[in-house]
Amino acid sequence: MQVQVKFFAIFREMVGKKNDAKEIAEGTTVEALWREYAVASPRLGNLRAAYSVNQHLVKGDHVLRDGDEVGFLPPVSGGQVKSKKVKAKSKIRVHSRNSRITKNALITTRRLDLNALVERVEFSGAGAILVFSGVVRDNARGKSVKHLEYEAYPEMAERSLNQIIAEIHERWGDVRVAMAHRVGKLKIGEASLVIAVASPHRPDAYAASRYAIERVKAIVPVWKKEFTLDGEDWVEGPIAGELSPDKAEQIVADAERAHP
């Protein structure tokens, strides 16, 4: 049997390849396959990993089949978030004539178009439209940042964004959401993540926005490398999937109690 293996971010650098066609024995689990690579690249054994098969997160005992696409995922990266509230008919809203955003969940190398995301969610019954923009700042953990580079598992990342949108719809049925994450090299002040939320009522818009950003930081396979005056480092967050939706719900509830 043969599987197609994908490595990302720090794992890609350690193994020295992004893709590998691997012959495996019948009954091989994804964790057993990971251990094989860790033997060949011992530094891998000191790092936490999440596993995906055919772009879905799986546990280590998942048995692989011929033709599977296996992803070994380092801890995902979150980011500093700035937010602004955009009213449904605000004067600062300008429609984008040439929007490149044609779906509600997008991973792209292009500069993010805030207004295009707003257009994806606006509707006549919206009483509030909120936009959260994660931007590159010039410092992190006491170091001066020169720029960032983002890497993603694009197909799985878009699938994860759509999962978050579905979770939001289950909790706030009247809310509309669109999200886009940029990858590649980003300069200071450029947006890496934009989340647009439209809702008939302001409280639901705030709650859904908070939920969305927490879930993005918890499950979306996107990795961030910081380039500082002292060198470069991959930013380590949680393992994809180790934080449940309950964690995001608790953050939303705490925020609502603090700012009713």
Image (cartoon, grey):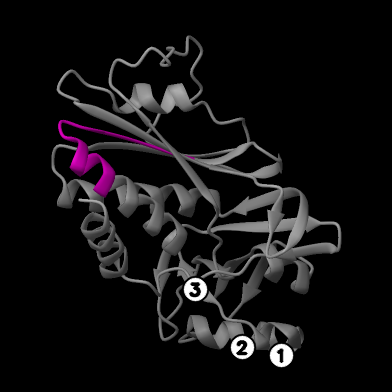
Q: Is residue 9 above or below residue 179?
A: below
In the structure shown, which secondary structural element does the residue marked by tag 2 occupy? helix
Instruction: Give the residue type at disc 1.
Output: Val
Start-end of magenta stretch: 194-207
Please give the name of the residue rendered at 48% of the width and 18% of the height, measured from the top-left corner: 99
**Badge number at residue 35:** 2
The residues tagged by marks 1 and 3 sit, at their Cα atoms, a distance apart of: 17 Å
x and y percentages locating residue 217 in the rendered image: 46, 59
User: In the visual, does 257 lie left or right of 142?
Assistant: left
Looking at marks 2 and 3 on the same chain, the residue that comes earlier in the sequence is marked by 2
Q: Quadrant of the N terminus?
A: bottom right
Q: Are marks 1 and 2 in contact (CB under 8 Å)?
A: yes
Instruction: Give the residue type at disc 3.
Output: Tyr
Instruction: Give the residue type at disc 2.
Output: Arg
User: In the visual, does 62 lie left or right of 193?
Assistant: left
In the image, is residue 200 part of the stretch drawn in magenta? yes
Q: Which residue is mark 3?
A: 51
x and y percentages locating residue 6 in the rendered image: 62, 64
Quarter holding residue 141: bottom right
Q: Is residue 137 above or below residue 43?
A: above
